[in-house]
Amino acid sequence: MQEVRDGFHEVLRHLHRLTISSSALLKIAEKQQYKELHEKEHMEKALEAVAKSCELAKTVADEVDKLRDTVYTQLNIEI
Amino acid sequence: MYKILIVDDDIDVVETIKNYLETEGHSVFAADNGKSALEIVAKENPGIVFLDIKMKGIDGLEVLKEIKATDKKTKVIMVSALLDLETRTKAQDMGCDAYIRKPFDLDDVDKALSAKINELISDPSILIVEDEKGQVDNIIDYLKERISAKFSYTLTGEEALEKIKDELYNIMIVDISLPGIDGFKVIKRAHEINPHIDVLITTGYTHNQVINEAVGNGVVDIMSKPLHLPVLEKKIMGFIQRRGFKSS
């Protein structure tokens, strides 16, 4: 049981980092500092990085959902 | 501006939160383990601490216990992915002020911070140690109108030390010339009881030896008598802001 708890804790730990970093970027976007990026012609690279991060985050979320489905099935919990 | 300590063994998380809060104008300290956290608490006395529970070495609950033993008024927000009932109860018994469950974002940090800042704003405690009752009344009447704080006074050093043993004061205004134990001895003993109390001395003497001796005894500021009350107010406000009770 402890191993499972530690495993989920680790997943949440990474998700936490993802959440904090994403919200930090959002805060900057809210403050319109992306305008400055655009002016410096870095906007394209920033958008590329955002798209890639989004894809990776989706992959992680999909994996965790699959794991949840497996566990629920094994425990006969209705989704 | 507030003094805030972030404690988490994930250094990326700590740095991101630190950078954000610094851009919001706070003075932020970071630690990635319990030992460093306690060193920072002892040195900087932050008003608010975000404290991860699960850490290698000294864990968050142990750190919480130490922080509350040092200064009960420090607001500690416990942070964890797995806040089970047993852990929450333990943390609560040890004086934890709030919880946030991971993962959280920077808006959650803002919300938790605002709540604790509101609590901090409400109750700085100020002790005035002055043997002239008329002077005490003047100080309290003037400051009460302008500063939201809890004021107490004593006419002797001995009484002051008794009060400091019983209650957590944040600021002490001490006259150096007191009957019985003099102001310097009161400050020294007061700091042995409560190392985090900020001290402002009032004195009729202004020569260097008095000032040097005072600073050596942990005094933060000095005022010459007769006191100019608007200046006293400004100095006390400075203490309150540095300690993290009020925004500047």
Image (cartoon, rainbow, N blue to C red):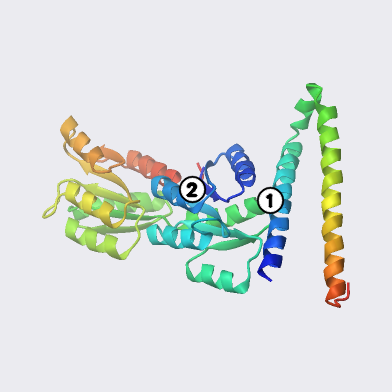
Identify the image quadrant of residue B156. bottom left
Q: Is residue B161 visible?
A: yes
Q: Position of residue B68 (x, y in %)?
A: 43, 61
* Mark identifier at residue B246: 2
Q: Position of residue B123 (x, y in %)?
A: 44, 58
Question: CA–CA distance between discs 2 and 1?
Answer: 21 Å
Q: Position of residue B70 (x, y in %)?
A: 38, 58
Secondary element type, mark 2: loop
Extreme-left residue of the structure? B180
Q: Position of residue B58 (x, y in %)?
A: 49, 57
- Of the pair A72 and B202, the residue shown nearer to us: A72
Name the amino acid, label 2. Lys
Task: Kindly identify the residue that appears in the image at 87 percent across and 56 percent down.
Answer: A62
* Mark identifier at residue B148: none
Asked if marks 2 and 1 fall on the same chain, the answer is: yes
Q: Chain of mark 1?
A: B
